[in-house]
Image (tube, rainbow, N blue to C red):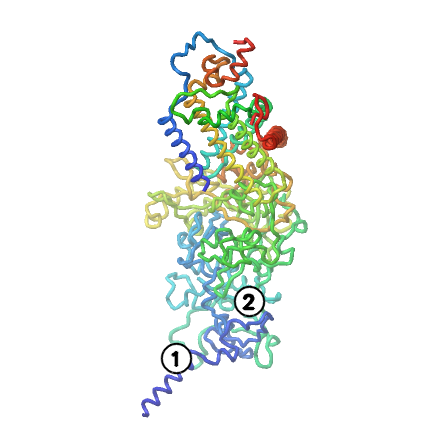
């Protein structure tokens, strides 16, 4: 059941991404903007980038061990389970740090309604159209809170399962909730990956570099860029 | 008219004879009184030819269970049951069980035998053992039936040494199991088998009478003897019946219980811990089920066909009988949804408690059998020797049996069973001489045959130690009686030289011990791995310990620790009778487990408390963040609803 659901879900996302790419294409800074003359702006601090990187890597290991074991071995055990548990510890720790660090900046603002109602920030419009956003656009915020909620679900189920509170039926239910919460998180991350690597052209650079092109920042995160620019720190 | 009347009379007569219309109302030819009250069995005894026995007859013959019990019970149906059908190739073998162990001290042989198709055992015929030899060797702990009544001695057994014509048949002895009192004596039974008094065994074992002499001493009669006027019939052993056991109507009270008590089962199914580290007998507890007042047959049930429920988890599938599903540990305690009966599907039969297994990750129930945590002696750093009724003739008094009496069986061995789950097993390492064929198959040689050609090369093993000497020996193990490699070489050469090519079947002589196959490579001895040298293991179901003494009751590190016997206990082997046991493997090898992984888990579990603390902290932080911003968002949303509009800004509450 789980294998069928997981394959269908991920295949559906891949299909949707392919259709989106073919129909709408990536959202990029319009031609004609003199990006070079605008310079760069600081986007994510070193701490944030390390945090994000560790979070991504640990989650990748979690997803590969869980889905790999489920798909190819039929169960999560042995080395896969050991790696899963180890990666899970790292993921839990960094997710808590990420929650503390980014929660304040992911609170929804008034312009997020505008972002959401304009073809999800223009990602579902074929014409090039800038939609204002803060440091994180509404899509990123949605992803943040989704990831935080599903992450909490996966952590809480394991935390409860290692306590002598639930019998084997309860344990089995907790593990099922854990598996499906994890699967939904994988689905959310795949969507996030697609947007950051493909649909939002150039976004991936901010994961590795301290600064991003100011033109890119103004186009995708105008509200944040404007405030940032007003401070004269460019 | 006369013809018609005659035909009708004949037909009526036939109908009366064939269908026994009186059987139902007269209370005979039925198998069950229908009452829960035990039926009082006041029985007339019949001999093997169906003649009523007169106990005063000086030439009285032994009673026949087939003819006596069979008056009311379907003997032929019963005799197809699990305890009698080992040699029937049509019967599914099911999960491997305890084999018969052919043991010989001189040739250092301990060889698992079974007619059932259990991997790792050899059929007796493969060792050249005939049914007659098998019955004499192991009949002491067989309930009769099966091979015991396959031959009549009328030239139907190809074994020229067989003496069925004198011994009679060893019929299934109902009282071996169903005797409700202590009158049935297994030791008397064993003695009669030893004397080749097969047909007398049920009578003597039940104490109905005694027989003087042995069928071994009976001889073929002279064909011309019948011409002698003084001829009194063929030589036989008359039974001297105990007349006090008969009532005025020459009936005997058989104190029978339909469901045998555990003590009857123990006659053949006792296992005891032995050796210097074994706890004294009075420290050893019995199975928790028996301690609670149950009997073996509360779970190991059967119908008239006597296919005893063995009680393992996959038995209902193996046997094609779904009704057995709730007679396994899990089926009884947890229920089984696949069972049609709603009550049985819920489990809890006879008040079996419903375990919750709180806090145990579900993977344990996928990887482990129930017995892994609940059954057998608490595991130690090294496996311990055990003795069983079948292997060591327990129940039969002996002044020579010591803890080192072969065969060498160890327990508990945590190995992966046929169902893919890890379970505690009993185990023995085969040791035997044999032939290795060109197709790499191994065929054992009967130890008696080896002794015939190579006894002078084999150093004798001291046997017949007194019990006191054995007690002293417990503190100081006997000298190692394992064969030197040079002896093995010599014996292999001798076997190759002396035994004919027909006997060898084109194979080369080999010796198996300690998990390796030894063969001659030129003049040197070479040890190679071979599946025929692999240890034979059979899962153990008992004794079940109380729940508070389960593995894991003290915590995860009962098993997940770098020195936990479950993974890292040593499995010892003795290279044959009286050889000194030595460690040869660790448990994980028999589980197919990766030792590095097992150690990694052991290390990881040392950090489990830290993991739980970290998880608690992180989950708490994330939940608090969700709560803090969730409540704020909820407040804003409610405010927006109240205001009829949202609030602006890039701060909290924009929506």
Q: Give the label on residue B175, or none.
A: 2
Tell me what residue is drawn at x 62 percent, y 51 percent. Answer: B466
Q: Earlier in the sequence, mark 1 or mark 2?
A: 2
Locate residue A71, reporting x and y percent. 43, 37
Q: Is residue B111 left or right of residue B255?
A: left
Locate residue B644, reporting x and y percent. 58, 31
Locate residue A165, reporting x and y percent. 63, 41
Q: CA distance from mark 1 to mark 2?
A: 41 Å
Kindly state the secondary structure of the residue where label 2 is placed. helix
Q: Give the label on residue B648, or none.
A: none
Residue most extreme to the front: B644
Q: Is residue B300 visible?
A: yes
Q: Is residue A42 left or right of residue A159?
A: left
Crowdedness of circle 2 by 10 Å Cα count: few (<14), some, many (20+)? many
Circle 1 sits on which residue? B227
Which dot, 1 or 2, sits closer to the camera?
A: 2
Residue most extreme to the bottom: B1
Locate residue B615, reporting x and y percent. 60, 31
Q: Is residue B101 visible?
A: no
Say yes or no: labels 1 and 2 on the same chain: yes
Relative to the observer, which residue lies in front, B509 or B596?
Answer: B596
Relative to the observer, which residue lies in front, B608 or A133?
Answer: A133
For disc 2, the chain is B
Crowdedness of circle 1 by 10 Å Cα count: few (<14), some, many (20+)? few
Q: Note whether B345 is above or below A92 in the view shown.
A: below
Residue most extreme to the top: A37
Kindly state the secondary structure of the residue where label 1 is placed. helix
């Amino acid at each position: 059941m789980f294998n069928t659901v997981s394959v269908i879900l991920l295949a559906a996302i891949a299909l949707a991404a392919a259709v989106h790419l073919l129909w709408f294409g990536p959202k990029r800074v319009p031609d004609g903007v003199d990006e070079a003359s605008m310079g760069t702006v600081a986007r994510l601090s070193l701490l944030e980038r390390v945090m994000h990187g560790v979070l991504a890597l640990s989650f990748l290991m979690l997803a590969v061990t869980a889905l790999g074991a489920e798909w190819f071995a039929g169960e999560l055990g042995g080395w896969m389970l050991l790696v899963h548990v180890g990666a899970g510890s790292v993921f839990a720790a960094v997710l808590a740090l990420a929650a503390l660090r980014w929660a304040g900046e992911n609170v929804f603002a008034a312009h997020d309604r505008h972002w959401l109602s304009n073809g999800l920030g223009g990602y579902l419009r074929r014409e090039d159209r800038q939609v204002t956003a803060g440091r994180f656009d509404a899509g990123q915020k949605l992803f943040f809170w989704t990831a935080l909620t599903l992450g909490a679900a996966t952590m809480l189920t394991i935390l409860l399962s290692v306590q002598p509170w639930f019998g084997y039926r309860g344990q089995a239910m907790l593990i099922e909730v854990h598996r499906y919460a994890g699967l939904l998180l994988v689905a959310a991350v795949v969507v996030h990956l697609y947007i950051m690597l493909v649909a939002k052209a150039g976004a991936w650079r901010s994961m590795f570099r301290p600064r991003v092109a100011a033109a890119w920042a103004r186009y995708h995160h105008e509200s944040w860029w404007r405030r940032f620019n007003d401070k004269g720190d460019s | 008219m006369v013809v018609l009347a005659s035909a009708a009379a004949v037909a009526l007569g036939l109908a009366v004879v064939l269908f026994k219309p009186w059987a139902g109302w007269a209370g005979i030819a039925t198998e069950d009184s229908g009452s829960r009250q035990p039926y009082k069995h006041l029985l007339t005894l019949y001999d093997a030819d169906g003649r009523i026995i007169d106990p005063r007859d000086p030439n009285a013959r032994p009673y026949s269970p087939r003819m006596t019990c069979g008056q009311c019970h379907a003997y032929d149906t019963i005799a197809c049951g699990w305890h009698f059908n080992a040699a029937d190739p049509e019967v599914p073998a099911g999960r491997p069980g305890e084999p018969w162990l052919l043991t010989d001290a001189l040739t250092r042989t301990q060889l698992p035998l079974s007619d059932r198709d259990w991997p790792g055992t050899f059929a007796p015929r493969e060792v050249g053992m005939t049914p007659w030899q098998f019955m004499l060797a192991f009949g002491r702990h067989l309930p009769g039936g099966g091979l015991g009544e396959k031959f009549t001695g009328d030239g139907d057994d190809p074994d020229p040494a067989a003496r069925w014509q004198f011994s009679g048949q060893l019929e299934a002895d109902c009282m071996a199991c169903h005797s409700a009192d202590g009158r049935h004596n297994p030791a008397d039974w064993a003695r009669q088998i030893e004397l080749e008094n097969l047909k007398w065994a049920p009578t003597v074992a039940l104490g109905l009478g005694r027989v003087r002499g042995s069928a071994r001493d009976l001889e073929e009669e002279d064909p011309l003897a019948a011409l002698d006027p003084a001829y009194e019939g063929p030589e036989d052993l008359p039974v001297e019946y105990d007349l006090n056991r008969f009532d005025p109507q020459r009936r005997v009270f058989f104190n029978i219980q339909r469901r045998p008590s555990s003590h009857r089962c123990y006659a053949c199914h006792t296992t005891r811990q032995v050796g210097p580290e074994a706890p004294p007998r009075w420290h050893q507890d019995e199975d928790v089920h028996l301690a609670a007042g149950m009997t073996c047959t509360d779970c190991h049930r059967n119908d008239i066909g006597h296919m005893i429920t063995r009680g393992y988890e996959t038995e209902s599938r193996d046997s094609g009988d779904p009704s057995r599903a709730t007679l396994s540990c899990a089926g009884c305690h947890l229920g089984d949804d696949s069972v049609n009966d709603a009550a049985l599907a819920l489990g809890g039969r006879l008040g079996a408690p419903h375990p919750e297994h709180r806090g145990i990750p579900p993977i344990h129930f996928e990887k482990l059998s129930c017995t892994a945590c609940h059954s057998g002696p608490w595991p130690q750093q090294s496996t311990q020797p055990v003795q069983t009724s079948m292997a060591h003739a327990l129940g039969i008094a002996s002044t020579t049996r010591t803890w080192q009496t072969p065969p060498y069986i160890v327990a508990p061995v945590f190995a992966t069973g046929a169902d893919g789950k890890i379970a505690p097993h009993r185990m023995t390492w085969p040791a035997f001489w044999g032939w290795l064929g060109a197709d790499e198959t191994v065929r054992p040689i009967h130890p008696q045959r080896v002794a015939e050609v190579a006894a002078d090369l084999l150093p004798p093993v001291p046997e017949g130690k007194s019990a006191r000497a054995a007690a002293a020996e417990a503190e100081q193990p006997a000298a190692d009686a394992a064969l030197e490699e040079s002896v093995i070489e010599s014996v292999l050469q001798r076997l190759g030289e002396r035994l004919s090519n027909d006997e060898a079947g084109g194979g080369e002589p080999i010796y198996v011990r300690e998990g390796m196959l030894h063969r001659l490579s030129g003049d040197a001895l070479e040890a190679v791995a071979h599946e025929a040298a692999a240890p034979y293991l059979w899962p153990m179901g008992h004794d079940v310990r109380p729940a508070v003494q389960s593995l894991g009751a003290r915590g995860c590190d009962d098993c997940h620790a770098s020195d936990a016997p479950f993974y890292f206990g040593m499995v010892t082997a003795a290279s044959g009778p009286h050889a000194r046991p030595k460690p040869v493997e660790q448990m994980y090898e028999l589980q197919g487990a990766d030792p590095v992984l097992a150690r990694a888990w052991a290390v990881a579990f040392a950090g489990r408390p830290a993991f739980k603390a970290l998880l608690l902290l992180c989950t708490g932080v994330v939940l608090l963040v969700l709560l803090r911003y969730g409540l704020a968002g909820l407040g804003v949303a409610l405010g927006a609803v109240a205001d009829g509009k949202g609030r602006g800004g890039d701060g909290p509450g924009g929506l």
